[in-house]
Image: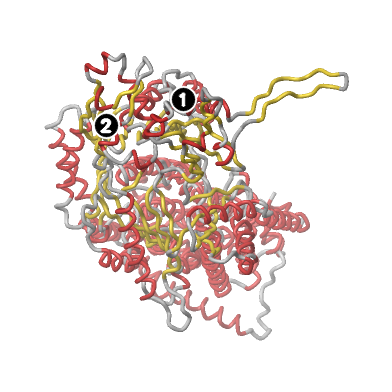
């Protein structure tokens, strides 16, 4: 095949053009752009609404029944649930190897079969947990109230949905509409009515009924009754009661009808104004940039026609992040490519350097062809894969080009030199590429929350390497055959003079330094190996003694800063909102402080404040602000500094259960997360307090909190003997109280895009105090009515705000943040584990787990351990096959530990901590560092087969392979160099992997040129003893 393609340059060029054009087509039309990759979910969610119910009622009536119904299904990894006021949420994690969609059908069947849910429970929603890909959020802010803001936001939403590239939007930051019919107890007594009778009257009168067809000679005529009410005045006209004198009582005569919002306390403000948001999502292969551009053009076009008092803007623009980050990494790749080309041009003939470099875009285009097949998008991780492989991809072409040029000096023709030169190194080059493929392959199978993220790298790197192998074997020789030796009589160009200087420099380095050092190493083989091993263990000891710290995932500053406030459960909404507004004002002070006097622009762009939430949550709120991206920020001030100042400005909030600040990216879990599980919430709470006390003793631990806030105060209704005597029962009384206070849902009507609940209840003025509760009228079975205080007593208690469960046991999590740069995480976790083991002995029946980053670390390290064994075995096998030896692969692999030491030294030079990405870089490094050793050993074997002494073959191989070995290593390092100094935020967590690969290769290269020849000689001596 090599000879055929070399002789048939048309076929080689057609292959080249096909790869380029197909890759360009795939890149331009088949590969979406996004910041981080999107993944198929492996979780199934079951949600049920039970409005007005306590968390304990939700747990008993809904959550436990769902858990029991599905717990024995195959393919379930874990069942976790959350029971809160008015709703239940059950999440089922799918075990690896099972199809989530098949399990979804089984779970839906089981849940739909449950017929013991409370009567007020809404239909369960069973679905694959959705990972929506939000692109941008449109903000509608105004000087007016919530209703006016929402009405205009709905118009904007409908307009945006009509844009060409927009297919899915959602309104957020607003409450749902609700039509509330409120009748006072005095009115009920006056007209001898009950709330239940009013509910019945509304339900019967407000409806559309189809009555069939009238069969006439002219055709069928539909018969129907159109009585469905949709608006306030239509409901007001409903007849509630007919009087004996023939008059009628209409709903509007006795009720206050509020066509407004549900009573859930929610308030959202954007840059200090009432706001609503339209969240815009991308679907399937849609480009985030195209979607966002449509939205931003709409906003710009409508600025001049906005109603007075309204503002239209955008927030969370993911496309801007996509553009800047993709541009930044693309720039790094281009800079790396230019540096690689410059380096190749210095050491190779210009024509050879050009065709070697052409292998990079060709191989990249091959990867672009493969990416849609594997569902990979162009994102931070996949681009990083291209940068990682930028310098590696030319290794095979460099070795091939160097060897072809060597043969050109003795071959009869350029074609013969191209064929012989390529064929001679085909085996070591092919297996060298395969070892690199084998080293990257395990990254696709890392478990844990970040595993799918890491998997993007090998899906890019492996196709690039394989296509580079194809290009170097079938395309490159067809072009190298036209290379001519330079005519010595012609005058040398400036470039040729420069190249000659570099060549002379290399020759001088080989003669003056390398060959003498190698000769001494070969003379004192054991001493040389001992020296290397000694250096290895010295550096290893420095690492284990804390010279370089390990942090599982580095703390990377974000461009979004958030503070979340949680006050005691039951705190009035007005109190919480006051503190949230104060935190927002403090953010505005920072915004003004860091505003440029000339341009008027601030480091802080926009400020979003939100208070309350669904389900009656009135005790929490948050404030977020965006800051200018790092690469376009003139000031050195960043999110960490802003958080520190903001924390000082806010100070201590009296009575706050927690006040947490977040300003980092890539954080999917807490650095410290202790999960307690048992049956008694009181016991779990007691243990949690002990754990929080212990955590507070660590100086670098802060923001300590637990997942169970203090419960709401609760009044439990207990029926008295008098109540029983009147024929009442607990359920009937509780339902009447619920309908009076929470309300009875009579209907759900559809108004345009809005689903509106119609509720009947007492006015808010009669639902404010315990006295109001005691005075509500309870209807007896005989039709009479008595105050609640006559038939029941109220017992004070406390209800938990939420109840979390995992695998059918109640759980409580204690979480905390930590200063990673000043903490030995391994020592801290060991001390905490020892304390927890002792604590658990005092509480039989209670278990604990270290979750959060500790769990991610366990899962990732478990995968890495198996990956390391896999890589070593595969690489050993791939080396043994071409070398036809069981022992020589060990010589080649002897440089691996030194490559890893080089990676650690690189982190020290760069002032970085080791991270999980550093370890992944070391894993990939294993497959790369053996390539030079393989070529070196293969060359020694070839020279030995030609006859002569072993020592001469070893020395000749070292001198002959010195230049290509150094060149392949330098191209790898040079290709990564722009990334090593990248400032872009999203690129920071990737740099440790590049450091491991770049510095590890450079360090291992110098070791390879000495240690491999020495080990080869020692292995020969060892084998001679058994001959």
Side of 137 relative to 854 (left or right): right
Pick whichever, 365 or 477, lies toward us.
Answer: 365
Pick whichever, 844 or 833, lies toward us.
Answer: 844
Query: Looking at the picture, how far across and down is residue 771, in whole percent?
Result: 25, 36
Query: Looking at the picture, how far across and down is residue 596, in whole percent?
Result: 43, 80
Q: Are there few (<14), some (14-19), or many (20+) residues within 10 Å of tag 2?
A: some
Vertical side of 729 occupied by 771: above or below? below
Side of 356 relative to 67 (left or right): right
Q: Earlier in the sequence, mark 1 or mark 2?
A: 1
Disc 1 from disc 2: Cα separation = 21 Å
Pick whichever, 665 or 440, lies toward us.
Answer: 665
Quick one: quadrant of the C terminus?
A: top left
Q: Are there few (<14), some (14-19), or many (20+) residues within 10 Å of tag 1?
A: few
Q: Are marks 1 and 2 in contact (CB under 8 Å)?
A: no
Q: Quadrant of residue 398?
A: bottom right
| Residue 892 appears anywhere in the view | no
Q: Residue at x 29, y 45 (%)?
A: 854
| Residue 119 appears anywhere in the view | yes
Q: Residue at x 36, y 14 (%)?
A: 782
Count of numbered circles in the view: 2
Side of 204 relative to 114 (left or right): right
Q: Mark 2 sits on what residue?
A: 774
Q: Quadrant of residue 408?
A: bottom right
Helix, strand or loop under label 2: helix
Vertical side of 579 occupied by 488: above or below? below
Query: Looking at the picture, how far across and down is residue 682, in whole percent?
Result: 19, 33
Helix, strand or loop under label 1: helix
Mark number displayed over residue 197: 1
Mark number displayed over residue 621: none
Vertical side of 452 occupied by 906: above or below? below
Side of 180 relative to 16 (left or right): left
């Amino acid at each position: 095949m090599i000879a055929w393609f070399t002789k048939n340059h048309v076929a080689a060029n057609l292959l080249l053009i096909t790869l380029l054009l197909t890759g360009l087509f795939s890149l331009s039309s088949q590969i979406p752009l996004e910041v981080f990759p999107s993944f198929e979910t492996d979780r199934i969610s079951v949600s049920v609404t039970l409005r007005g119910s306590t968390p304990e009622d939700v747990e008993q009536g809904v959550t436990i029944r769902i858990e029991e119904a599905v717990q024995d299904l195959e393919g379930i990894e874990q069942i976790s649930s959350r029971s809160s006021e008015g709703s239940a949420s059950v999440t089922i994690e799918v075990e690896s190897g099972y199809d989530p969609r098949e399990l979804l059908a089984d779970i839906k069947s089981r849940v739909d079969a449950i017929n013991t849910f409370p009567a007020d429970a809404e239909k369960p929603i069973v679905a694959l947990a959705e990972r929506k890909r939000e692109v941008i959020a449109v903000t509608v802010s105004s000087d007016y109230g919530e209703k006016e803001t929402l009405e205009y936001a709905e118009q904007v939403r409908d307009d945006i949905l009509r844009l060409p590239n927009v297919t899915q939007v959602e309104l957020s930051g607003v409450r749902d509409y609700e039509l509330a019919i409120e009748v006072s107890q005095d009115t009920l007594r006056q007209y001898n009515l009950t709330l239940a009778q009013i509910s019945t009257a509304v339900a019967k009168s407000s409806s559309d009924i189809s009555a069939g067809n009238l069969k006439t000679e002219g055709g069928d005529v539909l018969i129907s009754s159109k009585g469905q009410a949709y608006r306030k005045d239509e409901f007001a006209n409903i007849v509630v009661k007919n009087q004996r004198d023939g008059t009628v009582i209409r709903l509007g005569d006795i009720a206050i009808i509020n066509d407004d919002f549900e009573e859930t306390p929610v308030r959202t403000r954007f840059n200090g104004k009432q706001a609503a948001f339209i969240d815009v999502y991308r679907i399937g292969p849609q480009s985030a940039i195209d979607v966002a551009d449509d939205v931003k053009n709409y906003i710009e076009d409508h600025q001049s026609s906005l109603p007075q008092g309204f503002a239209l803007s955008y927030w969370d623009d993911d496309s801007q992040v996509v553009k800047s980050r993709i541009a930044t990494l693309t720039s790094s790749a281009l800079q790396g490519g230019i540096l690689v080309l410059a380096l190749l041009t210095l050491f190779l003939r210009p024509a050879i350097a050009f065709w070697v470099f052409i292998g990079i875009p060709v191989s990249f285009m091959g990867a672009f062809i493969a990416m849609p097949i594997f569902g990979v998008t162009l994102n931070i991780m996949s681009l990083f894969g291209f940068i990682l492989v930028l310098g590696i991809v030319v290794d095979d072409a460099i070795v091939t080009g160097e060897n072809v040029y060597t043969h050109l000096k003795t071959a009869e023709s350029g074609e013969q030199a191209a064929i012989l030169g390529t064929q001679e190194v085909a085996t070591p080059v092919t297996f060298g590429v395969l070892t690199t493929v084998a080293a990257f392959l395990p990254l696709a199978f890392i478990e844990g929350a970040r595993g799918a993220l890491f998997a993007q790298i090998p899906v890019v790197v492996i196709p690039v390497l394989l296509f580079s192998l194809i290009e170097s074997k079938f395309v490159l020789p067809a072009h190298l055959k036209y290379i001519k030796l330079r005519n010595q009589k012609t005058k040398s160009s400036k470039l040729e003079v420069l190249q000659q200087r570099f060549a002379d420099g290399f020759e001088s380095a080989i003669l003056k330094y390398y060959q003498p050092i190698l000769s001494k190493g070969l003379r004192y083989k054991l001493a040389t190996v001992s020296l290397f091993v000694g250096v290895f263990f010295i550096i290893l000891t420095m690492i284990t003694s804390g010279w370089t710290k390990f942090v599982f995932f580095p703390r990377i500053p974000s461009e979004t800063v958030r503070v979340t406030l949680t006050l005691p459960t039951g705190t009035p909404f007005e109190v919480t909102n006051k503190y949230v507004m104060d935190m927002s004002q403090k953010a505005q002070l920072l915004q003004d402080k860091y505003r440029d006097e000339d341009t008027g622009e601030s480091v802080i762009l926009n400020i979003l404040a939100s208070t309350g939430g669904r389900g009656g949550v009135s005790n929490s709120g948050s404030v977020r602000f965006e800051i200018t991206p790092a690469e376009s920020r003139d000031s050195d001030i960043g999110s960490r500094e802003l958080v520190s100042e903001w924390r000082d400005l806010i100070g201590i909030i009296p009575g706050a259960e927690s006040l947490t600040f977040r300003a980092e990216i890539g954080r999917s879990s807490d650095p410290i997360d202790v999960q307690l599980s048992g049956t008694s919430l009181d016991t779990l709470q007691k243990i949690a307090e002990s754990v929080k006390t212990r955590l507070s003793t660590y100086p670098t631990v802060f923001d300590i909190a637990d997942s169970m806030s203090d419960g709401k105060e609760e009044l439990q209704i207990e029926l008295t003997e008098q109540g029983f005597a009147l024929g009442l029962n607990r359920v009937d009384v509780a339902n009447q109280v619920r309908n009076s206070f929470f309300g009875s849902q009579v209907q759900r009507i559809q108004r345009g895009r809005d689903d509106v609940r119609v509720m009947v209840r007492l006015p808010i003025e009669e639902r404010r105090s315990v006295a109001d509760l005691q005075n509500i009228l309870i209807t007896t079975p005989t039709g009479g009515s008595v105050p609640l205080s006559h038939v029941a007593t109220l017992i004070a208690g406390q209800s938990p705000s939420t109840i979390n469960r995992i695998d059918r046991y109640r759980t409580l999590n204690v979480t905390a943040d930590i200063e990673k740069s000043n903490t030995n995480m391994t020592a801290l976790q060991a001390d905490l584990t020892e304390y927890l083991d002792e604590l658990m002995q005092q509480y039989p029946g209670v278990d604990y787990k270290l979750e959060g980053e500790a769990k991610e670390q366990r899962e990732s390290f478990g995968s890495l351990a198996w990956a390391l064994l896999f890589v070593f075995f595969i690489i050993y096998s791939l080396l043994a096959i071409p070398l036809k030896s069981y022992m020589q692969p060990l010589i080649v692999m002897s440089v691996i530990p030194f490559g890893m030491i080089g990676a650690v030294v690189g982190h020290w030079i760069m002032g970085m901590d080791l991270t999980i990405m550093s370890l992944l870089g070391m894993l990939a490094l294993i497959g790369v560092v053996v390539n030079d050793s393989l070529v070196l050993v293969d060359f020694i074997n070839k020279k030995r087969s030609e006859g002569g002494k072993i020592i001469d073959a070893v020395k000749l191989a070292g001198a002959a392979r010195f230049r290509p070995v150094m060149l392949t290593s330098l191209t790898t390092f040079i290709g990564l160099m722009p990334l090593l100094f990248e400032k872009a935020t999203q690129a920071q967590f990737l740099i440790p992997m590049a450091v491991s690969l770049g510095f590890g290769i450079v360090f291992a290269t110098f070791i390879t040129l000495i240690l491999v020849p020495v080990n080869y000689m020692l292995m020969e001596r060892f084998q001679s003893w058994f001959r």
